[in-house]
């Protein structure tokens, strides 16, 4: 399913649009209109079908994002006196399972739910809030069922993901910085099997370059080393040689991970050999109203709503945990989340000879032409 689902804000607002592929819930394009110019802020191939040969490019990752150690024996996991066996499948190396295994959610088809009446994991009040965006072509809920035992994960899992665009709020005439709107992604999951428990950790594996669309005017527009990055974190997760967590925290102060301490604020300052691929633990907890919520189905009423606030929240009221900006394009992205941290990755393991780069970013758009994105030409933030 590589036919894009197109989402856009109403034409009278500053332009913000997405192309979402049901295959892997892939963000194929993220368009913004700024200063009379069209930018596509995410990397990737020109042809949606080329995502089939390009792993993790702007896809969802799961059932469990990031790296899990594998073992010859199943892990025994328990919650609320329920126990299941879990056998992560190696794919990155014999000892590491990455992003859900050999055939994770990134390579699976999701179903766009054109009828809100078919939605199961959002309440009636939430669906009423979402309905207007459905009518305006600014939202879609995608569904898939992950079967019991898929990639070693126990339990049959129902997953529904809301992808929505939110208009800027209030007058912007006197603002020095024009808001182009917001992208909201809400992940919902429910085990359909009784007496099963499963690990789950979902996020979007999207890669950004805020300057790549300036290919005709800015030298080295593909490099992200001129981008400015702010991450509100005091620690990263300490890693083994294979990228697995050691269980210890490493302070960022005085290191290349302390992005706020850099004199220029640019990512390229103190760039480490091999680039970045680390999890940053946020220094502040999420507000209670937005912390991850696990609720028994019996307590969900038709009037329960966790999405309404996301559609009405003023951008000025949000204290972003991550900000990415470019002086060259004048574009800034602010990230908010109810999760505990962010993975920052600079495309270190890419092979430019095998991928494809969009024409708007100066590439041929054709896979295998050798003009794809190289190390340091995009950065991925899994918030």
Image (cartoon, helix red, strand yellow):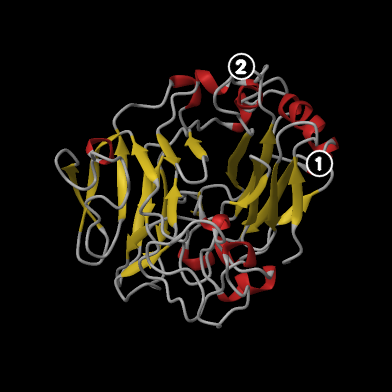
| Above or below, 13 relative to 192 | above
| Above or below, 14 relative to 85 | above
Task: Work out whether residue 177 or residue 324 is closer to the camera in this orientation and state it.
Answer: 177
Q: Which residue is mark 1?
A: 137
- Of labels 2 and 1, earlier in sequence is 1
| Image quadrant where residue 14 sits | top right
Position of residue 2 in the picture relative to residue 261 (left or right): right
Label 2 CA crowd tier, 10 Å (few <14, some 14–19, many 20+): few
Label 1 CA crowd tier, 10 Å (few <14, some 14–19, many 20+): some
Picture residue at 50% right of the left edge, 38% below the top: 332
Residue 369 placement (x, y as % from top left): 55, 82
| Image quadrant where residue 285 sits | top left
Q: Which residue is mark 2?
A: 174
Element assignment for label 1: loop
Picture residue at 45% right of the left edge, 43% below the top: 383
Residue 179 placement (x, y as % from top left): 60, 29
Label annotation for residue 234? none
Element assignment for label 2: loop
Q: Is residue 87 visible?
A: no
Residue 291 placement (x, y as % from top left): 45, 28
């Amino acid at each position: 399913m590589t036919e894009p689902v197109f989402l856009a804000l109403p034409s009278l607002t500053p332009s913000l649009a997405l192309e979402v592929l049901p295959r892997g819930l892939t963000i194929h394009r993220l368009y913004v209109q700024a200063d009379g110019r069209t930018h596509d802020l995410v990397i990737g191939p020109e042809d949606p079908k080329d995502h089939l040969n390009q792993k993790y490019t702007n896809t969802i990752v799961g059932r469990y994002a990031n790296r899990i150690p594998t073992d010859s024996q199943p892990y025994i996991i328990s919650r609320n006196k329920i126990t299941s066996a879990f056998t992560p499948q190696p794919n990155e190396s014999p000892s590491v399972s990455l992003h859900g295994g050999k055939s994770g959610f990134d390579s699976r088809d999701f179903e766009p739910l054109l009828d809100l009446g078919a939605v199961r994991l959002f309440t009636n009040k939430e669906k009423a809030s979402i309905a207007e965006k459905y009518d305006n072509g600014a939202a879609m809920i995608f569904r898939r069922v992950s079967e019991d035992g898929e990639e070693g994960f126990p339990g049959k899992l129902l997953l529904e993901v809301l992808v929505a665009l939110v208009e800027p709020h209030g007058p912007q005439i006197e603002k020095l910085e024009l808001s182009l709107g917001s992208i909201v992604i809400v992940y919902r999951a429910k085990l359909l099997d009784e007496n099963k428990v499963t690990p789950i950790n979902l996020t979007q594996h999207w890669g950004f370059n805020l300057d790549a669309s300036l290919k005709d005017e800015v030298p080295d527009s593909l490099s992200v080393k001129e981008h400015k990055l702010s991450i509100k974190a005091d620690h990263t997760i300490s890693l083994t040689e294979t990228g697995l967590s050691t269980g210890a925290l490493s302070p960022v102060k005085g290191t290349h991970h302390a992005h706020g301490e850099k004199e220029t604020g640019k990512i390229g300052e103190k760039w480490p050999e091999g680039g970045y691929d680390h999890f940053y633990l946020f220094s502040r907890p999420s507000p209670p109203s937005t912390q991850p919520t696990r609720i028994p189905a019996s307590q969900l009423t038709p009037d329960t709503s966790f999405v309404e606030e996301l559609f009405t929240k003023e951008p000025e009221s949000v204290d972003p945990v991550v900000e990415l900006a470019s002086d060259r394009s004048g574009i800034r992205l602010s990230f908010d989340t109810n999760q505990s941290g962010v993975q920052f990755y600079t495309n270190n393991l890419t092979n430019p000879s095998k991928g494809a780069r969009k024409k708007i970013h100066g590439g041929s758009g054709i896979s295998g032409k050798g003009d794809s994105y190289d190390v340091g030409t995009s950065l991925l933030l899994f918030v």
